[in-house]
Image (tube, rainbow, N blue to C red):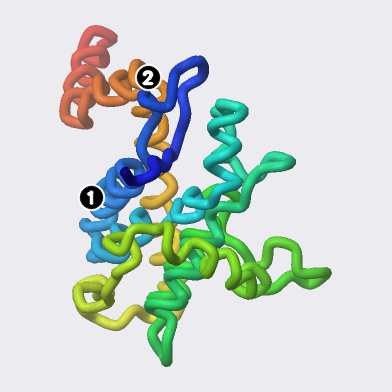
């Protein structure tokens, strides 16, 4: 029997009611794809979602969930938390960062920063959380090679393309990366919220669309006239 791995726990609930890790990865991947499809980057966003929490396969992370039933275990910015975002960044670089392929590095930035924000490549003083330093922690990935399912490790660049299959102008690249980053962060947040606070997630779908809001606004203004 395969050992279960979890993305999130529920306070006071047994592991059987926790969110499976692979379920979370696929949910985030699909959401991120939907968000980024409109500007031609759905496939890259899908991969970012699929890899973003690979580090949660670490024994230390799973142990923290089990022993502490820690709802904040996913927040690696808090003291004593497990770095789970570097693993996915490392995997993206190993699979898609060869030669002049830019996709591995783009994915590494997105994944490494999905909790703390897009990292710098280097820092002026010290290394800190600089991406260049984090990508040197290759042992994190090697230790998980046999643990992470093959179906998650096998990624391909064959379907990845830039918006409209046209080269991006250099001055637009940073905006494109930030848009992708927003897609990943939003997808991660929304799926986490849907699992931990489903009532709040349901409320998010109850908003009126812009057409309805305009109709209400026009009616209100007519009454004021």
Q: Residue at x 53, y 52 (%)?
A: 58
Q: 119 or 152, which lies in front? A: 152
- Which residue is label 1 attached to? 34
Q: List the single residue furthest toward the right.
A: 125
Q: List the single residue furthest toward the bottom.
A: 99
Q: Looking at the rendering, in which quadrant would you find the C terminus?
A: top left
Question: On the rendered structure, is 220 left or right of 113?
Answer: left
Q: Residue at x 45, y 55 (%)?
A: 54
Q: 95 or 216, which lies in front? A: 95
x, y (%) of residue 88?
47, 62
Q: 112 or 221, which lies in front? A: 112
Which element carries disc 1, helix, strand or loop?
Answer: helix
Q: CA distance from mark 2 to mark 1?
A: 21 Å
Q: Residue at x 58, y 64 (%)?
A: 140
Q: How many marks?
A: 2
Relative to 218, does residue 25 appear above or below in the rendering? Answer: below
Assess disc 2: are there few (<14), some (14-19) or many (≥20) residues with their C-alpha within 10 Å of its C-alpha: few
Q: Looking at the rendering, in which quadrant would you find the N terminus?
A: top left
Relative to 190, does residue 205 appear above or below in the rendering? Answer: above
Residue 97 image label:
none
Which element carries disc 2, helix, strand or loop?
Answer: helix
Which numbered disc, 2 or 1, marks the residue that appears first in the sequence? Answer: 1
Q: List the single residue furthest toward the front.
A: 1
Assess disc 1: are there few (<14), some (14-19) or many (≥20) residues with their C-alpha within 10 Å of its C-alpha: some
Residue 200 image label:
2
Q: Residue at x 56, y 44 (%)?
A: 61
Assess whether mark 1 and mark 2 are in contact (beta carbons under 8 angstroms). Answer: no
x, y (%) of residue 133?
67, 72
x, y (%) of residue 122?
69, 73
């Amino acid at each position: 029997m395969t050992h279960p791995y979890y993305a999130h726990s529920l306070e006071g609930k047994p592991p059987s009611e926790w969110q499976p890790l692979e379920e979370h990865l696929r949910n985030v991947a699909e959401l991120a794809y939907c968000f980024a499809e409109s500007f031609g980057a759905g496939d890259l966003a899908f991969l970012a979602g699929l890899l973003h929490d690979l580090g949660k396969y670490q024994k230390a992370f799973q142990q923290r969930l089990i022993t502490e039933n820690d709802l904040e275990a996913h927040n690696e910015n808090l003291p004593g938390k497990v770095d789970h975002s570097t693993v996915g960044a490392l995997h993206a670089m190993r699979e898609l960062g060869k030669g002049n392929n830019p996709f591995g590095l783009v994915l590494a930035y997105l994944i490494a920063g999905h909790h703390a924000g897009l990292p710098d490549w280097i820092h002026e003083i010290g290394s800190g959380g600089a991406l260049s330093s984090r990508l040197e922690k290759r042992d994190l990935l090697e230790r998980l090679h046999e643990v992470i399912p093959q179906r998650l490790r096998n990624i391909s660049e064959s379907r990845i393309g830039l918006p409209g299959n046209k080269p991006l102008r250099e001055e637009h690249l940073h905006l494109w990366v930030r848009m992708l980053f927003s897609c990943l962060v939003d997808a991660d947040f929304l799926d986490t919220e849907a699992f931990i606070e489903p009532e709040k997630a349901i409320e998010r779908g109850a908003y009126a669309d812009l057409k309805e809001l305009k109709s209400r606004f026009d009616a209100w203004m007519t009454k004021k006239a």
